[in-house]
Image (tube, rainbow, N blue to C red):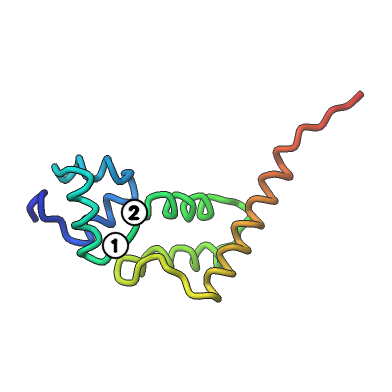
Amino acid sequence: MFLNDPTLRDIWVAALTHTGAQAAAHFHMGKTRFKKMCKKRGLATWPHRKLCSFGHLLLSPALNLTEKAFIKDLVIRAPSGGLDLDVDNLKRVQDLKLRVYKSTAKNSKIRFSF
C-alpha cells in the first residue's frame, strides 16, 4: 500500500482515530485531494463523528450486550455499505442514543439539600 493511494479499508481505519484533516495529513495529501479521493472510493462524508457517537454507545452501561452487538455489527459492515442506515436501524439507533442520554443526564443532575 502506498500512502498516497490508500484503499477504502485504510481510509476506514484512519476514520476511527482521525478527523478528516488529520487523515489527509497522515496520507501525505491535501484536504481537497483527500476528499475527492474518498468520494471516488464511495465514502461521501467523513464518518469520524458518527463513529465516535457509536463508540460512546458501546461504552455506555445503559445498553445490554445484544444492543452493543447490534452497534458493533453496524460499524463492522460499514466499510462495504457506508453508515447510511435504513429506516428501521435508524430508529433503533436513535432510541438507543436517547436512552443513553437519559441515563447519563439522570445520573449527572446536581442535587442541592437545604
Residue located beneath label 1 in the image = 43
Residue located beneath label 2 in the image = 46
In the image, 88 versus 65, the foreground residue is: 88
Quarter assignment of residue 81: bottom left
Quarter assignment of residue 114: top right
Does dot 1 land on a helix, a strand or a loop? Answer: loop
Q: Position of residue 71 (x, y in %)?
A: 48, 64
Quarter assignment of residue 24: top left
Residue that sits furthest to the top in the current view: 114
Mark number, residue 108: none
Q: CA distance from mark 2 to mark 1?
A: 7 Å
Does dot 2 land on a helix, a strand or a loop? Answer: loop
In the image, 74 versus 61, the foreground residue is: 74
Residue that sits furthest to the right in the current view: 114
CA neighbours of label 2 inside 10 A, class few (<14), some (14 to 19), many (20+): some
- Is the residue 82 above or below the residue 57 in the image? below
Q: Please give the name of the residue rendered at 21% of the width and 56% of the height, measured from the top-left corner.
A: 36
User: Does the CB distance between marks 2 and 1 fall below 8 Å?
Assistant: yes
Q: Please give the name of the residue rendered at 23% of the width and 61% of the height, measured from the top-left corner.
A: 9
In the image, 63 versus 88, the foreground residue is: 88
Q: Is residue 109 left or right of residue 62?
A: right
CA neighbours of label 1 inside 10 A, class few (<14), some (14 to 19), many (20+): many
Q: Position of residue 43 (x, y in %)?
A: 29, 62
The amino acid marked with disc number 2 is Trp
The amino acid marked with disc number 1 is Leu
Q: Position of residue 104 (x, y in %)?
A: 66, 45
